[in-house]
Image (cartoon, rainbow, N blue to C red):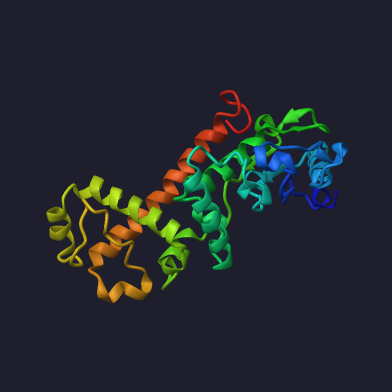
Amino acid sequence: ERVRILGHNAIRIWGPGGGHAGASGEAGWYDSDSMKRGELGNAEAVDRFDRFFAECKRLGLFVMFPATHYIKPLPGMIEDGSFLQGEDLADWAAWKQAIQDARQAGVGDQLLAYFDERSRQFRFRHAKNVLDHVNPHTGRRYAEEEAICIFELNNENGFLQWMLAADRVGKLPPYFLAKLQKQWNEWLRTRYATDEAIQHAWGETVEGEALAAGSYAPAPTAGQAKTFPKTRGDDFAAFLVDRVVTYNRDLVALCRSCAPQGVGVN
């Protein structure tokens, strides 16, 4: 009411920060009724968010909506039986350990989503769950909610700054470092096709690096800039930008697919 009295017609609402609880977190679906079944979760927070949104709409306020990305890592996402598990159990076990190692090293899950399939799947599933959620106080799915003026898909992502800062790539657990290196080499193969073309573009390469072996290291970061050719640094930065652009483009497409043409998020 104060926002409206002050003459504003829009507000950015943070929350609810989850909505998954117990088995729902492992299954990957949004559960605003979990509290009614005696499960632990934050269904109460989801309802509080829904009610506050409905009040903003009633007062004629448009809403900037960060809920599609406002999600904290869930214990259930790294439990056996999680929707992220897949059929490769050895890779699943390695990923679970790497996620825990990354968290201990201060590497946020949101950073991994740009080059790790499971981290991306988790965040994409959350966005879809939120958009499919029906606010009981408005009777509308958030995907089709015309009171939302901006569907915010990311905030302060920091991926490029983190990855290019001195010695940060070295903090990645070996599992994720290998994944980043594999994608970097695939990117180089698409761009240059041969080691000779890379040598010509960069002027020099590190002895032993080769496309066939996928052994071009993900470098240089800021601390290594003086020891590598500038052209290589430009390429590595362009590769990282491509990770962000691809992620964003795919997430936009997913969100738009949640509503009919010309409605809400679409």
Picture layout, residue 165 above or below residue 251 = below
In percent of width and height, residue 231 lies at 23, 63
Picture layout, residue 144 above or below residue 176 = above
Residue 34, quarter of the rendered image: top right
- The C terminus sits in image quarter: top right
Q: How many marks?
A: 0
Q: Is 153 left, or right, of 191 in this rendering?
A: right
User: Which residue is rendered at x = 26% and y = 51% of the image?
Assistant: 188
In percent of width and height, residue 78 lies at 61, 49
In percent of width and height, residue 212 lies at 21, 51
User: Which residue is rendered at x = 18% and y = 62% of the image?
Assistant: 202
Residue 144, quarter of the rendered image: top right
In percent of width and height, residue 106 lies at 56, 67
Task: Name the residue nearer the viewer: 13 or 197.
Answer: 197
Task: Name the residue nearer the viewer: 21 or 134.
Answer: 21
Task: Name the residue nearer the viewer: 112 or 226.
Answer: 112
User: Which residue is rendered at x = 47% and y = 39% of the image?
Assistant: 250
Name the residue at the top extreme.
260
Q: Is 72 left, or right, of 105 in this rendering?
A: right
